[in-house]
């Protein structure tokens, strides 16, 4: 049974309902944050009853984690494709970090949900990113690229710190683009080179 609410998404009713729920939730989470979005409010926005949404997702947590898995899966797929085709580990790492920036710019709502969203779903020392198998696998791929670039890859702590450094360069740049899309950043490709290339070239 549908509600009498007039939905701004009425023209998208032809797509599967699950996709409509995910698309709308992604937008709402990105705009308002995890805590402020309720299942009832989501239902109102798409013009269905809350019961209808619960037929697809048991609660807000499951819905949110489904969205994070989508973006992690997309990033992991892109990472694997780059590593498979690029034999030079340093160039592979550079391409992976560039791709993260590009995908974040093209899908800012998904990036916010996957990498910039504060929730209460995990203990304070963890996150929905590190607690997700796809997120961990993606990070392990980056660590492996970093390890192959290093002259002393046996030092695990140094590998971890170096991987953190290059990810921080890529994520920091992407987060700025996502948070301030209307700022005059200049040519994005040149900015990627100035931020990411030194981080990758510094690996020894």
Image (cartoon, rainbow, N blue to C red):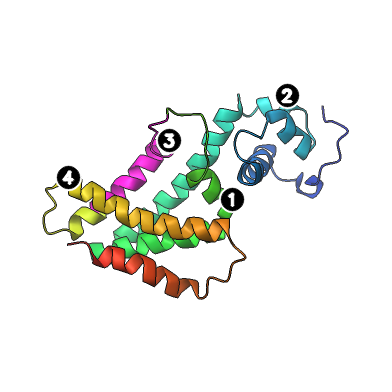
Q: CA distance from mark 3 to mark 4?
A: 22 Å
Residue positioned 59% across, 36% down in the render:
34
Residue 87 can be seen, yes or no: no
Residue positioned 12% across, 59% down in the render:
151
Residue 99 against residue 73 in the figure, above or below: below
The tag on residue 156 is 4
What segment is highlighted magenta in the picture?
A: 124-144
Q: CA distance from mark 2 to mark 4?
A: 49 Å
Q: CA distance from mark 3 to mark 1?
A: 18 Å
The image quadrant of residue 2 is top right
Q: Could you tell which of marks 3 and 4 lies nearer the N-terminus? A: 3
Q: Quadrant of the C terminus?
A: bottom left
Residue 187 can be seen, yes or no: yes
Q: Which residue is mark 1?
A: 109
Q: Could you tell which of marks 4 and 1 lies nearer the N-terminus? A: 1
Whether tag 4 and tag 1 are in contact, CB under 8 A, the answer is no
From the top left corner, tell me how far across and down residue 157 is, in percent.
Answer: 19, 45
Q: Which residue is mark 3?
A: 127
Tag 4, which secondary structure?
Answer: helix
The tag on residue 51 is 2
Q: Could you tell which of marks 2 and 3 lies nearer the N-terminus? A: 2
- Residue 135 in magenta stretch: yes
Tag 3, which secondary structure?
Answer: loop
Q: Residues within 10 Å of mark 4 (few under 14, many from 20)?
A: few
Foreground mark, 2 or 1, reads 1
Q: Residues within 10 Å of mark 1 (few under 14, many from 20)?
A: many
Foreground mark, 2 or 4, reads 4
Left or right, residue 154 beside residue 90: left
Tag 1, which secondary structure?
Answer: helix
Residue positioned 78% across, 32% down in the render:
48
Left or right, residue 104 beside residue 95: right
From the top left corner, tell me how far across and down residue 74 is, in percent.
Answer: 46, 50
């Amino acid at each position: 049974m549908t509600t009498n609410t007039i939905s701004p998404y009425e023209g998208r009713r032809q797509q599967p309902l699950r996709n409509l729920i995910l698309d709308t939730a992604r937008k709402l989470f990105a705009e308002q944050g995890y805590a402020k979005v309720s299942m009832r409010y989501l239902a109102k926005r798409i013009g269905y009853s809350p019961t209808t949404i619960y037929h697809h997702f048991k609660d807000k947590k499951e819905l949110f984690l489904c969205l994070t898995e989508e973006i992690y899966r997309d990033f992991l797929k892109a990472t694997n494709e780059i590593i498979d085709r690029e034999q030079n580990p340093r160039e592979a790492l550079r391409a992976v970090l560039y791709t993260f920036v590009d995908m974040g710019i093209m899908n800012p709502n998904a990036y916010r949900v996957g990498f910039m969203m504060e929730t209460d779903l995990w203990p304070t020392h963890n996150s929905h990113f590190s607690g997700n198998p796809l997120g961990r696998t993606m990070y392990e791929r980056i660590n492996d690229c970093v390890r192959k670039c290093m002259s002393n890859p046996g030092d695990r702590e140094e590998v971890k710190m170096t991987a953190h450094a290059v990810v921080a360069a890529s994520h920091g740049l992407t987060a700025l683009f996502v948070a301030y899309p209307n700022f005059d950043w200049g040519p994005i490709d040149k900015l990627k080179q100035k931020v990411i290339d030194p981080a990758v070239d510094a690996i020894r």
